[in-house]
Amino acid sequence: MRIGILTVRSRAGEEGGAERFFAGLHRGFVDAGFAADLVAIPSDESTFEAIEETYLRCYDFDASPFDAVVSTKAPTYLVRHPNHVCYLVHTIRVFYDMFDSAFEGAGRRVQAQRRLVHRLDTLALSRPRTRSVFAIGHEVARRLDRHNGIEATVLHPPVGLDALHAGPFGDYVLLPGRLHRWKRVRLAIAAMRHVARPLRLLIAGSGEDEDALRASAAPDKRIVFLGRVPDDELVELYANALAIAFVPLREDYGYVTVEAFRSGKPVVTCTDSGEAALLVEHERTGLVAAPDAHSIASAFERLHDDRGLALALGAAAQAKERMMRWDRVVPVLSTALGARSIA
Amino acid sequence: MILDFPTGTVNVTEISDENFDLDVLMQRIRSEVEKRRCVNQRATLGAGASDGRRVADEGAHDALQLDRVEEASVPFEAKDRYSVHDFLPYHDEEFLTRVYRGVLRRPPDGTGFASFLGQLRGGSLSKVEALGRIRYSTEGRAAQVPVAGLAPRFAVRSMRRIPLLGRIVAIAQYLVRLPELAGNCERLEAAVFQRDGALRRQMDRNSALVERSVNAVIEQSAVRSAKTRDDLARVEQQIGALESRARESQAAVDALHGDVSNKADSTELAHLALLVGRKAERQALAELSDRMATPSAGTDPRFDAFYLKLEDRFRGSREDIRGRVEIYIPLVAGAGAGTQRRPIVDLGCGRGEWIEAIAAHGLSGYGVDANPVMVADCAQRGQRAVQADALDHLRSLPTSSVGAITSMHVVEHMAFSRLLAVVEESLRVLNPGGVLILETPNPENLLVGAGRFYIDPTHQRPIPPPLLQFVAEHLGFVDVEVLRLHPMQQDEWFAHASPERQRLNDLLFGAQDYAVVARKPGAVEDEPEPPREAL
């Protein structure tokens, strides 16, 4: 049984969470004894015309050499193959959850474009074109249900960094990730103003908001910007932290949460952080705070004052992460494809 | 962020018709994409192709093109001077147009042209008269274009309009010109026949072309509709086959169903018999091992007092324990336990730290302990505890009557068969969705497994996490999780964990205890919440 894993590659060729996901999924199938190929279809979402052409490329992709096909990100699920399941990363978000913020007061033409994209996605993801739909998280599944009326099974994928491990509980909260408006790093910085403990906030990552964030944090010496950190250093930063802060607005998946779990650390997140708020169970695997500086600050202080709590939450988080491994995910997908490994 | 998706002249495929299939939509998108490519290609070919003709149209069908009837005449030639013979061989519109362009040096205008044409066609004006009137109009005189031979002819022709004399002039003129007129007639006849032949040949050629094209179209559509008929027949055949297979499957399912319900009764009985047998066997074993167990609680008052002191010394301070058990609060509360109807039962409650935590969170529950000194200790603090053997107490409880059963640092005191019995009874006593929490020292930590475990003389044997987890799963619990708890203080750890040091850290300073958390299958039912009273 030869399995094709369909992915997209943008012109810029950036490497992010999704690319690590593709590689992990591929290796998961190979480790489970399947002959699997990773196929990248060129993608361009810069204009509506480019999106149409990308849809057409996926629709026209010749998948006949494969016995089974797993599609991932939009619009790879347009592929025509009798044995096809979709493990959805996400649809084209500017036409879904980001529509209102992307097109303020959209005109009739853009509305028509959105209708077309929704209709294409709905038809492509329905049976018999797609046998089953899986989603990487509750957020994605919920959106698919709301906009397309399609039911998806949530299948949390693991994170790519194998080296993550537990370690001693240090005197800092780690905030990893891109410094972008949607990640709300500003909120964590504001929270530090209300933290009256010798607790540091280490921010690992770079991005378009970096300068503004550095300026707003400048008076507080406990806030340290580490810039972009290589993977092996990041692993140690995770291992030695007291807790991990992850406070984005409506994040789809949030690899940070799972990376923290894998490192046996509790996660401080917000009620409106999307998937992270669903993955983190309050007082079980972390603390879920209201999205304001005071609530986040008291969560930080609570963990600082009660190491026992931090330890227990971290331990439960680590146990939970063990359930999200490729050797748990791949059998679900291959069963849906009616596939049996050759090994 | 405002995204601008410029769409140029292209229309978005309209999808007001909800019945459109994906393939139809994709075909539309394909044609739009191709159209755009065409436009772009034309743009890149530059202004040279701006005459509006298509530059590239791959895949377009050959268009049918018919020949046009050629113009028989000589093209008009602008000259300084003309003779009447430059104009007279032409007829009708062409004659008039040439007169206008030659004599007035301009293309004909609407009204004058139409009026002359009408009179010419009606026979009320001859060509010579028309030519003369235009030449000698105000505009014609101004243009001063010489037309040789016009003046006498026009004069004679105009004389015909004089009453009486005009008729005589006309007859005389015809008589003089008779041979010339006859010649004209013959030439005209020959020209008409020649033109007629040319036209007929042209028509035949075009008819043949049209016939060929139309026949090709008819043939093609016949082939297509035959193919469509075949496809349709095949699809109908397939549907028929599928329907009969579905009927067969249904019949097979019905047969199986009958079979199964017949067999069900006997299978159920056999299964029950097996269960009863296993249970009796286990009970006998448990009772036997109970009698063989080392100094057990509740039998020797001096031992009981010793044990209370021992716990004080080694289990950790009351405050420590109180803080540690806090993490179980969300677990039991999440399972709907701690109400009047679904109390929390703590087996081996000891000094009652956990019952205290339960009460502090407004939850209902009580402790069970075989040691009367412990029970008295609890009672003194106003906590509810009953003196009883854990297994005996569980057996006394009704089925599905308890929200959560907890037991901290107790199972390691039990003979293994007894542990099995306690877990099995817990499954019966718990509500669907209720949780069982068993905390015990973690022998994965070598310092615990090799030494500290044995400080307590009543400990039986260390229980590795996978064993306890397996016991719960085996006896029918679901969602069985292991929580590894209480690693040693970080100042004991080897710093800057390398993989080797990390491993050593785990082995020596990792979780000193663990808890197995297991759930009874089924969903927690909502219960009408009665006003919560303190027990």
Image: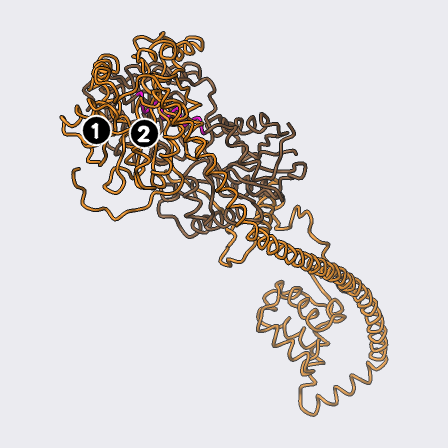
Chain colours: A brown, B orange
Give the tally of numbered discs: 2
The image quadrant of residue B203 is bottom right
Can you give x and y, in whole percent of width and height, for residue B46 in the image?
60, 41
Label 2 lies in what chain?
Answer: A
Q: Tell which tag, 1 or 2, sits nearer the viewer.
A: 1
Can you give x and y, in whole percent of width and height, for residue B49 in the image?
63, 45
Can you give x and y, in whole percent of width and height, for residue A157 in the image?
47, 31
Q: Is residue B135 a member of the stretch shown in magenta?
A: no
Residue A301 in view in this figure: no
Which stretch is magenta? A311-323
Q: Helix, strand or loop at disc 1?
A: helix
Q: Amino acid at mark 2?
A: Arg
Q: Is residue A318 a member of the stretch shown in magenta?
A: yes
Q: Which residue is mark 2?
A: A284
Q: Which residue is mark 1?
A: B357
Image point (79%, 86%), residue name: B172
The image quadrant of residue B454 is top left
Q: Return the residue nearer the eye: A265 or B365.
A: B365
Image point (48%, 24%), residue name: A160
